[in-house]
Amino acid sequence: MFAVAAVALLVALGLALVRAVGGPTVFDRALAGNAIGTLALLMLAVLGFLTGRPEFLDLAILYGLLNIVGTIAVLKFFRFGNLGDPGEEEAGR
Amino acid sequence: MSLALEALSWILIVSGSLFCVTGALGLVRLRGFYTRTHAASLVDSAGAGLLLAGLLLQAGWTLVAVKLVMIGLLIFFTSPAATHALANAALARGLAPDAEGEGVPSKR
């Protein structure tokens, strides 16, 4: 049962990777990166159940947190042109 | 565990992973960035929700179930914020909604 879910998630990860590589705009790549992060999180949970090791779920929680922080940082860079101090002059507004 | 619970969790897990594949397929097939955002959110909402619910039934009343609920809450709160930030950044950077001729005849 978990093997079915793991294989399906692998297929979904492959498809998201295709979009990440082929995405015309940088936001397509950020979107694919976000999708890959969520799919990897689910894959970790399913593998934790498949191999009977509950500590994989801790990895999944941590990975989810890192994924959200990474996505927001990338988006801030591409929206404001720099990751600088928001106090200074807003570039690109 | 009772057969009914086992069958229900099996159905939830398979349908959740099916939604994940559908969302990822939509991510590849749809044209235009904003339609792809719609497809990608399918992975976050239906795919993750059903899959985690199926795993929750498997775990029963243990610490593992608490961790699964934590993951569910994490996805529930952060993925809409990330999708909003994505669309906002794309719009602010001048990616007009119908820039790439998404095949939908825009009324304007």
Image: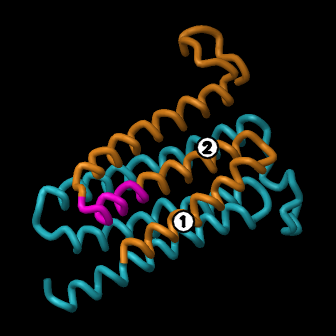
Chain colours: A orange, B cyan
Q: In the structure shown, which secondary structural element does the residue marked by tag 2 occupy?
A: helix
Comparing A93 with A79, the one in front is: A79
| Contact (Cβ within 8 Å) of mark 1 with mark 2 | no
Q: Quadrant of the C terminus of chain B?
A: bottom right
- How packed mark 1 is, by other alpha carbons closer than 10 Å (few <14, some 14-19, many 20 or more), is many
Callout 2: residue from which chain? B
Select label 1 or label 2 by which is in front. Answer: 1
* Residue linked to disc 1: B42
> Where the N terminus of chain B falls, by quadrant?
bottom left
N-term-proximal mark, 1 vs 2: 1
Residue situated furthest front in the rendering: A51
Q: Which residue is mark 2?
A: B86
Q: Where is residue B59? Give x, y as percent.
A: 19, 68
Instruction: Examine the rendered structure and indicate whether residue B25 appears above or below residue A62.
Output: below
Up the image or down, B66 lies above or below A74; here it is: below
Classed neighbour count for the residue bearing mark 2: other residues with Cα under 10 Å, few (<14), some (14–19), many (≥20): many
Q: Amino acid at mark 2?
A: Leu
Q: Foreground residue, B94 or B42?
A: B42
Image position of B36 (left or right of B95): left
| Mark 1 → mark 2, Cα distance in angstroms | 15 Å
Residue A51 painted magenta: yes
- The residue depicted at 42 percent of the width and 52 percent of the height is A41
